[in-house]
Amino acid sequence: MAILIYAEHQNGKPNKTAKELASYASAFAARTGDQVIALGFGLTEPEELYRYGVHKVLNVEDPRFADFNARAYAEAFRQAADATGASLILTGQTADALYFTPLLAGLLQSAYVTQVIDLPESVEPFTVKRKAFSNKAIAHVVLKTPVKILNLAKNSFGLRENAVEGTVETFAPQVDDGVFEDIKRVKVEKASGKVPLSDAEIIVSGGRGLKGPENWGMIEELAEVLGAATACSKPVADMGWRPHSEHVGQTGKQVAPNLYIAIGISGAIQHLAGVNSSKNILVINIDPEAPFFKAADYGVVGDAFEVVPALIEKLKKFKLNS
Amino acid sequence: MKILLMLSVVPDTTSKINFTDDGTRFDKTGIQFVINPHDEFGLTKAMQIKEKTGAELHVVHVGPKENESVIRKTLAIGADKAFRIDADPRDSYYTAAQLAEFLKDKDYDLIIAGRESIDYNGSMVHGIVSALTGIRFINAVIGLELEGDKVLVDREIEGGKETLETRLPLIIGGQKGLVKEEELRIPNMRGIMMARRKPLEVLPPVEAPELTEYVKFEKPPAKGSVKLIDKDNLDELIDLLHNEAKVI
Ligand SMILES: Cc1cc2nc3c(=O)[nH]c(=O)nc-3n(C[C@H](O)[C@H](O)[C@H](O)COP(=O)(O)OP(=O)(O)OC[C@H]3O[C@@H](n4cnc5c(N)ncnc54)[C@H](O)[C@@H]3O)c2cc1C
Ligand SMILES: Nc1ncnc2c1ncn2[C@@H]1O[C@H](COP(=O)(O)O)[C@@H](O)[C@H]1O
């Protein structure tokens, strides 16, 4: 039997999500004896996945797949699942995977569960733990079909090395040209040079307490010193101080970095819903009664306009000495 | 032009979540149910298109009778007609199968869903509907422009956005950005009065399998208490982040 994972990549290199999926699959395979197979589209460094326990990489080299196309990717996965006899398919919490995986689940008529946070608790019945109600609960769900599909919540399992000997094969899915014609990309806009929110290990986030967009210089500087991405609360995006793509929370992006730094954010329940899976939370707020402190690991009560510049200076010194 | 909103009904965002029957069932006591926030952006977009083109707007919801007050709200905001498929939407595939069956003999040009329901955060139903019906689908939509038969759709991607060109009929998974926050509609008195006379048709469910089953719920473990660091002692903070949390 086999476990099939989606090897998403950036410029041909498997990304962190792909490695996390490989780690998960490999840990599960240790229990079941399954083979771990990765499917990617235009990988140039597929071998990186062997380190995380992938035995075989199926690489689609057909140039029609170079641009992401959800329907075509779902078709490719269906064919790969058939070809490999996969009983478990894993994808990650990325924009593309969340788009094509439900299509795949519909095509295969397979049980599909998102927001999965841990290895299956039991194989028979096949039961997994997932987040639900915007992180306010954990649910135990049974998947009842022979082929099962899981979407793993970001940063929930982590990277675990387990090097194996692997092979790469070219995989050529049969997909009609019409599928690629049907929905066509005409433009892409990506913020360059900045750490994307979804991959960030550290996120520096600002709220209405920062008073105005002109005060974001120190937020960006703090992010730069830490190699972090920047985010914001909903009203900050609504008022146009920051782009919508930075809005985190229940109705914005859900993030789970190793460190989330909340500056001048009160910690409303809808904000917490999107960030409280973070491994560590540091809150900087002038009001000791701010609800965010209850959800934080570390807190500094103080004026952001004093604390943040001081923190930047100290971090710069720390980085120089380490 | 005909538009359909696939409506998910969810607990209000401020709800305290509890479970009964030994953690096997979500406790609805005291919970206020609302239009799923992502669907709300879609509803407003639909109203804008309706006002511009004279399109007809229908709403469909798979759920119990008690959700009709929320369905009525979409009628009060301006939808013309609603359908409720009388079933418990416990499983995404089952729910999607109901919606796919509903769509079989219809001719909607644009089908608007949300990126995800904020209760189970599944982000699945609309995608499965697309697979089952073959209607093309774009997810995480933050902008939509109709130019005759052509549609330009902005989709959020990792670290940015892309513009896709496609045609109707189309299913979208909408989210914030589809319309501006201040454009969101709330029902007014006249709308509420009119909604009472608008049709809300109840349809029986069709046979479909449930592929998943929720067997138990629990609350996540509570956070330990926060470590407060004096603002004049930020060296301690850096030390904690480096040596204890190991994040810098
Ligand atoms: C349906 C719905 C969905 C929502 N979804 C989201 C969501 O996804 N994400 C989200 O963020 N919100 C969401 N909200 C809004 C949420 O309820 C809050 O209104 C919002 O999070 C508050 O943003 P804030 O903390 O930046 O602002 P405020 O609540 O105004 O808090 C500002 C904070 O800054 C502090 N402060 C002020 N001055 C300083 C200073 N000099 N130094 C340090 N601290 C200072 C204050 O003490 C205060 O705690 C949603 C609301 C609804 C109804
Ligand atoms: N019970 C339902 N009835 C009608 N549409 C639904 C239902 N559940 C989900 N949807 C639609 O599918 C989208 C994604 O939902 P979900 O898969 O539950 O996260 C929602 O935003 C709705 O547009």
Image (spheres, coloured by chain):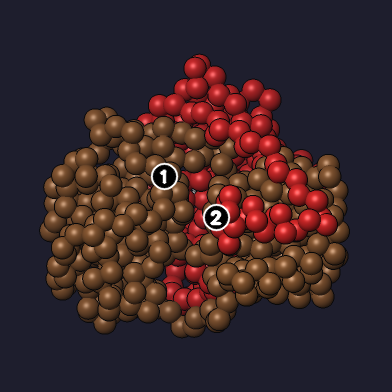
Of all chains, the one bearing label 2 is: B
Q: Say if disc 2 is inside 8 Å of ligand 1.
A: no
**Dot label at residue B246:** 2
Of all chains, the one bearing label 1 is: A
Residue A236 in picture, x, y percent from top left = 76, 63
Q: Tag 2's secondary structure?
A: loop
Give the amino acid type for the residue marked by disc 1 in the picture. Answer: Val
Question: Looking at the image, is A90 positioned above or below residue A125?
Answer: below
Give B93 or A214, whichever is nearer the viewer.
A214
Residue A69 in picture, x, y percent from top left = 36, 71
Q: Is residue B44 visible?
A: no
| Residue A183, image quadrant | bottom left
Q: Residues within 10 Å of mark 2 (few under 14, many from 20)?
A: few
**Dot label at residue A235:** none
Give A272 or A300, whichever is nearer the viewer.
A300
Q: Which one is in front in this view, the residue at disc 2 or the one at disc 1?
A: 2
Chain the render paints brown: A
Give the amino acid type for the residue marked by disc 2 in the picture. Answer: Lys
Viewed as shown, does residue A163 lie left or right of A266? left
Point 38% across, 68% down: residue: A15
In the rendered view of the protein, which quadrant contains the C terminus of chain A?
A: bottom right
Q: Residues within 10 Å of mark 1 (few under 14, many from 20)?
A: many
Chain the render paints red: B
Give A179 or A127, whichever is nearer the viewer.
A127
Q: Tag 1's secondary structure?
A: strand
**Dot label at residue A116:** 1
Point 81% across, 55% down: residue: B231
Residue A107 in picture, x, y percent from top left = 27, 53
**What's the CA distance linking mark 2 and mark 1?**
25 Å
**Marks 2 and 1 in Cβ contact (< 8 Å):** no
